[in-house]
Amino acid sequence: FSVSLGVTPTFSEYLIAPLIDRFSALYPGVAIILTELPLEQITEALINDALDLAIGFAGSHAVEIDSQPLFDEQLCLVMAKPAPDKQTALTLEDLQTLRFALLAPGFATRQLLDAWCQTQNFKPAVNLEANSIAILLKVVAQGRMATILPDAIVREQPGLREVQTTPALPGRTVALLRRKNGYQSAAANAFAKLVSNSTQT
């Protein structure tokens, strides 16, 4: 038995490992086939039955996709420690002085950020674009650049800190995705139930 699961890259950094650990403890005979893909490719794979389930974002998906909201995720400004003694929220003017290391434009996180920047008439100075969150975190930890990622990722990184901004950065709703009216194995249903129970706030 196996479950084919797709995730967008940000979830690989904080959400997936604990879920897989819990599932494998409950169902040791079921293998998980995990694929990390951009959201657009995830929805295509679900429609084509290449994936059983996926963890992505709520929003405008193809009509064939069923989206079950799980929890809200907030983007935040990430910088290297140490923090100054008195930390105040950074304004857009402050952000203009920073150099940024950001996910490449094809990622849902970057698209959300770009849309926010457009509404704020803010153009970040991007010195690095990468398709790897791990690389961004390592570069930011060096202290010369900042990044913008989900706040849950920062809590897993002892060398980094979350910095408040005004106006606040955008958020989004994380969702469990599957094909509408598609066949769901008992294993896939069990994983979906575990995800739902584990992430309800």
Image (cartoon, rainbow, N blue to C red):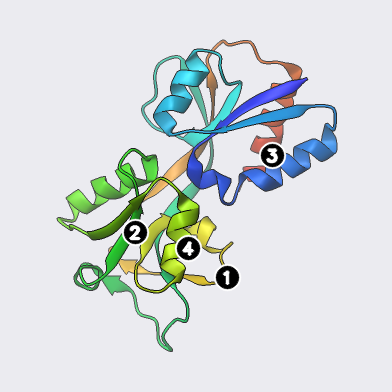
Badge 2 marks a residue whose secondary structure is strand
| Horizontal side, residue 114 vs residue 31: left or right | left
Which residue is disc 2 drawn over?
Answer: 101
Q: Residue at x 46, y 52 (%)?
A: 133
Q: Which residue is mark 4?
A: 138
Observer-side mark, 1 or 4, equals 4
Point out the tag, 1 or 2, that comes first from the N-terminus.
2
Image: 25 above or below 40: below
Residue 22, compared with residue 34, is above or below; it is: below
Can you tell which of label 3 and label 2 is closer to the viewer? 2
In the image, what residue type sits under mark 2? Ala
Q: CA distance from mark 1 to mark 4?
A: 12 Å
In this figure, which residue is indicated by the disc labeled 3?
197
Neighbor class of circle 4 (other Cα within 10 Å; few <14, some 14-19, many 20+) is some
First in sequence: mark 1 vs mark 4: 4
Q: Residue at x 61, y 29 (%)?
A: 5
The secondary element bearing badge 1 is classed as loop
Give the residue number, with chain letter if any, for mark 1: 158
Dot placed on the residue nearer the N-terminal end, 4 or 3 = 4
